[in-house]
Amino acid sequence: MDRRTFHRSLLFSTIAAPLVSAGPAQARPVRGVPRRSVFEFGLPLAEQTHELVKVPGLTLLLVSQMSNSHLVKARLDPATEQVIATRAHPVGGEQAMLHGLALSRRYPGLVWATQQGDNRLLLIDPNGADVDAPPLVLSVIDVPAPGRGPHYIGEYGDQLWVSLKESNHVLEIDHTNPSSFHLYEAHPNPIFVAQHPVSGEFYASQDDSSQILRINAHTQQAGQLDIPPEHGRTPVGLIADPTALWVALLGTQEQGTGTFGRIDANGDTTWFRLKSSEVADAGLLHIAFEPGNTSRPSAWLLGSSIICDDVYDVVVRVIFDAGYNEVLGEEVTVLPTQHCKAHRLLPLSRSLYVTELTSSTLAQLTTISWDRPTDPAPGDPS
């Protein structure tokens, strides 16, 4: 079936997801071919469904819908991690543009959020797992001028780091004393902000400039890292693992390049390019890592049609060697709803969730895999 006409047939159904094991000899899976299933769950209708977090201690996902500034509470079945109930709650007016979500460590069980239209940062109490119980806004921090348009938010001790899309700044602000802040000038458009786990520096992806802002918070000095054009353009997802930062390149309106990179403590980047035919031209938007996975170096990548119609909305699991110098294997799972502009990834203990930006949908991929021939697949004779 041509990918331009490949669409989902039914929500709340499970499919055997198209899965491909990658390419050249040096990039084949180490053992076996896992089989995954994909469930899709319809959310309350909205033009744009964006970020998601799992609330610690609760079988609950929170999902931001930016177009109408609603926060969706999605309750999960504790055994299967499937969505069993949803309810959307307004957070501000329809033009408030609720977007970024981040778990708070300083205030366990609470969540930080951004209102891009209202220029505010919020501290939200999800108010339990009951989807009918509306979330509670406990604290509001106004973004200081001339900053405008908070998009991403992350908590690092007493500091919040926020990307400001409308004014092209990165904001560092003390959530215990909001009068203490610093605005770093950025190039268009800052999207993600992340702290390098080794150097302690902060980095921000800037998609329209194809550069990454590098910030030393101690000296308040900043500089720019260029994306080499031979690798691609449009850095978006910028995520830390325990040893490095990772960045995904979205590409152009014509094509992606299936490229992502690993940034070391010195600011040097090792670039990787996907080999499977389905994702060699993928527009990569987001990266995620399995919680507590120490068995094999791996990562999840999200390919999205958000700026290019001629690429798959797809999830790719890549497996590395021990030193993250080489990709040993790729697993490609095509989402059943294409042209959904797949947006964010969230790994849980037994599955992986994906937000679909324009289809008001959550997709759930099973992540439990097995190695043949020693382990039978479900349904095989024992």
Image (cartoon, rainbow, N blue to C red):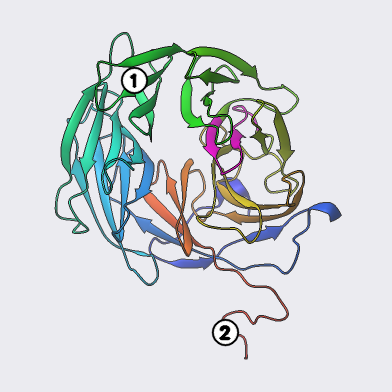
Of 311 and 118, nearer the camera is: 118
Corner quadrant of residue 333: bottom right
In the image, residue 59 lies at what x, y percent?
30, 61
Name the side, left or right, on which 263 lies relative to 146: right
Q: Classify 325 as above or below 58.
A: above
In the image, residue 32 lies at what x, y percent?
72, 69
Magenta region, residue range? 236-255
- Marking on residue 379: 2
Asked whether disc 1 touches disc 2, contact meaning CB atoms under 8 Å apart, the reply is no
In the image, residue 254 lies at what x, y percent?
64, 29
Q: Residue at x 23, y 27 (%)?
A: 96
Label 1 is placed on what type of residue?
A: Gly
User: Which residue is the extreme one toward the top?
Assistant: 146
| Mark 1 or 2, closer to the camera | 1
Q: Which residue is mark 1?
A: 149
Q: Residue at x 68, y 73 (%)?
A: 371
Q: Classify 202 as above or below 209.
A: below
For the question of whether residue 24 can be seen, the reply is: no
In the image, residue 366 lies at what x, y percent?
51, 64
- Kindly state the secondary structure of the residue where label 1 is placed: loop
For the question of whether residue 50 can be seen, the reply is: yes
Corner quadrant of residue 255: top right
Of 126 and 1, nearer the camera is: 126
Corner quadrant of residue 105: top left
Viewport quadrant of the N terminus? bottom right
